[in-house]
Amino acid sequence: MAKIQTLAELQSLRDKLVAQRAEGEKTPGSVVIKVAYATCGIAAGAKEVLEHMEQKAKELGVNATFVKTGCMGYCYAEPTLEVLIPGRESVVFGYVDEMRADDILTKYVINNEFVEGIIPVNYETID
């Protein structure tokens, strides 16, 4: 990637990435996996989990968009991730390591089976 030289170039890149992210979240049939990527998540291994899941999703042929997010408020359970599958409620998983990541993709995303590590919702969505 070329160096960003101006504020306008930075804003243009930001706009492009925001548009790509929004498009991925709207793509029918696309799974969106949001990985908490704040300081606590990174320190707990979120970077490694994200890289592993991206590779595993490709291997399994899972149509997924991976998004780095800020803190989800579950610092005690990092690394955490939220899985959004069209037609299902979103689910947040905690204490995700590579083995649990594999289970989330194969069991929950592909086979719609229960996977341990779900964090109960402690908020309401406002539309």
Image (tube, rainbow, N blue to C red):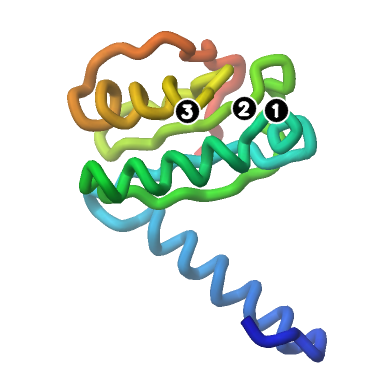
Question: What SS does tag 1 mark?
Answer: helix
The single residue placed furthest to the left in the displayed view is: 111
Question: What SS does tag 2 mark?
Answer: loop
Foreground: 104 or 89? 104
Question: What SS does tag 3 mark?
Answer: helix
Residue at numbered disc 3: 98
Point out residue 19 in the picture as x, y percentages from the top left corner. 50, 69
Q: Is residue 94 left or right of residue 114?
A: right
Residue at numbered disc 1: 44
Q: In this view, does 49 lie above or below 10?
A: above
CB-based contact (under 8 Å), mark 2 and mark 3: no
Q: How far apart are marks 1 and 2 (CA)?
A: 6 Å
Point out residue 65 in the picture as x, y percentages from the top left corner. 40, 52
Mark nearer the N terminus (1 vs 2) = 1
Quarter residue 103 falls in: top left
Mark nearer the N terminus (2 vs 3) = 2
